[in-house]
């Protein structure tokens, strides 16, 4: 029996009794708890802190968001913590969907899911709905077939006779022909992965509409085999122009088949799970919104890695990796995103900013901007750091300035709703003019 637990980042999960589950504290079964502990140990060995074990009955999640499905049927949905106050799961879930769609540049047919969204379906069912929607479109265009070489023995000639094998045929089998021929089949890596994802969806979905549609589609693909080696088939996924219509469904297959979960999670159990580090989702979301806002006026690059902090014996040491670089004309900004609720009202003279982050930005300014230009730290907007509030610029020297701004994560997808603080907005406006 499947049970769903909905929490948010840094929530506590416990096997002890809880008066009522909330987004910050929830009860899970002992079997799910033990599975999470084992999973967390695997994550930690790979340098990924999934959570902290506080006691034998209590663990605290870290900043990973998404869905985890345990072997006992417990589905744990982890949503973003974009405010310190209690908020509705629907609001946090809508934010996570928007971050996933934008930061991973997924194609989602919103018009098809308008009615479904009103029912506040969980992230896992939303994922399945998107996958099935893309699969329907793909099937209307037709699966890609390919010629497969078959070598077999037959009592009739078909294709090409294998002379070498035929000459070695024993007298008792002289009437049997060794033939080689081509069959036009849909047995391709892409189709095998789609079939495997569809089989997973059929057994995992709890939504009536998804269940009905998934079983309707799988009845059309009964002759198609499943993938026997998922990773190898993903590596063999063709980017040929004849398979352009396959591109939208690939990321959904990756989600369904656990390709967006670290390698340590993979094993005998394969539920539908996807995990994202929240800081990476936020970084990608901000970068994509910047691209939309700037358009053809400039360029936006992420994870720039062209400079080193210092040189040692003629080689660069400690590569610098700023999150975002924006270039408009002869103006250049180096930006870092921080998924942290900055308490400007109660943070004192430094607003709760990290000294470590300032040293990091100073290194970016020195090596990437040559101590001339603007650096930017971007935080999510919330009630104690709203998008219309300004923090006076920090000056490293007369030519290097650090701007601290908030980014509005409200449900706004239009470019004009990508709000920045006054200082940064004025800087962009001067360049645009």
Image (spheres, grey):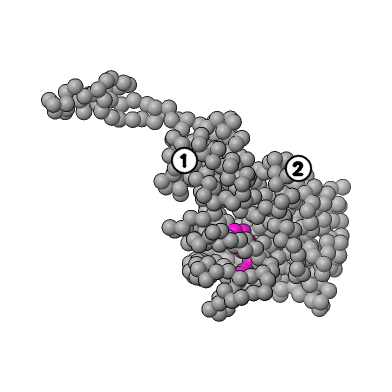
User: In the rendering, at what x and y percent does residue 206 appear?
Assistant: 59, 51
Q: Residue at x 55, y 77 (%)?
A: 57
Q: Is residue 129 left or right of residue 120?
A: left
| Circle 2 crowding by C-alpha within 10 Å: few under 14, some 14–19, many from 20 | few
Disc 2: which residue: 296
Frontmost residue, 31 versus 361 = 31
Q: Quadrant of the N terminus?
A: bottom right
Q: Tag 2 or tag 1, which sits nearer the N-term?
A: 1
Q: Is residue 99 above or below residue 147?
A: below
Q: State the SS at label 2.
A: helix
The residue lying toward the viewer, choosing from 416 and 230, is 230
Expressed as whole percent of the image width and height from the top left, the position of residue 218 reads: 51, 39
Gap in angstroms between the C-alphas marked 1 and 2: 40 Å
The answer to whether 18 appears left or right of 188 in the picture is: right
Q: Quadrant of residue 137?
A: top right
Q: Is residue 224 above or below residue 372?
A: above
Q: Which residues are magenta?
A: 59-68
Residue 117 in view = yes
**Residue beneath label 1, please?**
192
> Compared to 234, does 324 lie above or below?
below
């Amino acid at each position: 029996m499947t049970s769903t637990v909905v929490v948010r980042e840094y929530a506590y999960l416990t096997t002890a009794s809880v008066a009522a589950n909330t987004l910050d504290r929830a009860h899970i079964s002992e079997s799910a708890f033990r599975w999470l502990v084992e999973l967390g140990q695997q994550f930690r060995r790979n340098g990924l802190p999934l959570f902290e074990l506080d006691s034998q009955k209590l663990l605290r999640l870290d900043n990973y968001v998404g869905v985890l499905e345990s072997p006992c049927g417990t589905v744990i949905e982890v949503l973003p913590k974009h405010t310190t106050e209690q908020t509705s799961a629907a609001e946090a879930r809508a934010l996570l969907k928007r971050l996933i769609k934008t930061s991973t540049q997924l194609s989602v047919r919103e018009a098809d899911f308008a009615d479904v969204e009103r029912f506040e379906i969980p992230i896992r069912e939303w994922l399945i709905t998107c996958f099935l929607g893309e699969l329907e479109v793909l099937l209307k265009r037709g699966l890609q077939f390919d010629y497969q070489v078959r070598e077999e023995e037959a009592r009739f000639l078909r294709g090409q006779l294998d002379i070498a094998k035929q000459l070695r045929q024993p007298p008792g089998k002289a009437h049997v022909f060794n033939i080689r021929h081509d069959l036009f089949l849909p047995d391709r890596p892409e189709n095998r992965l789609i079939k495997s994802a569809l089989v997973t969806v059929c057994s995992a979905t709890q939504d009536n509409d998804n269940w009905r549609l998934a079983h309707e589609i799988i009845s059309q693909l009964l002759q198609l085999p499943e993938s026997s080696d998922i990773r190898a088939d993903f590596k063999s996924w063709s980017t040929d122009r004849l398979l352009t219509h396959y591109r939208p469904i690939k990321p959904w297959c990756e989600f369904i088949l656990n390709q967006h979960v670290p390698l340590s999670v993979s094993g005998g159990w394969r539920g539908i799970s996807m995990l994202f580090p929240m800081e990476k989702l936020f970084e990608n979301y901000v970068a994509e919104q910047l691209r939309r806002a700037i358009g053809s006026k400039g360029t936006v690059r992420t994870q720039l890695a062209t400079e080193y902090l210092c040189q040692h014996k003629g080689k660069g040491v400690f590569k610098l990796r700023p999150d975002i670089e924006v270039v408009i004309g002869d103006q250049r900004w180096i930006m870092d995103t921080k998924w942290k609720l900055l308490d400007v009202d109660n943070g004192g003279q430094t607003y709760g900013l990290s000294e470590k982050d300032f040293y990091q930005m100073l290194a970016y300014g020195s090596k990437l901007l040559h101590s001339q230009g603007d650096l930017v730290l971007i935080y999510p907007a919330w009630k104690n750091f709203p998008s219309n509030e300004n923090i006076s610029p920090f000056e490293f020297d007369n030519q290097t300035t650090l701007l601290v701004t908030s980014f509005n994560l409200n449900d706004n997808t239009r470019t004009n709703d990508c709000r920045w603080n006054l200082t940064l907005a004025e800087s962009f406006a001067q360049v645009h003019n």
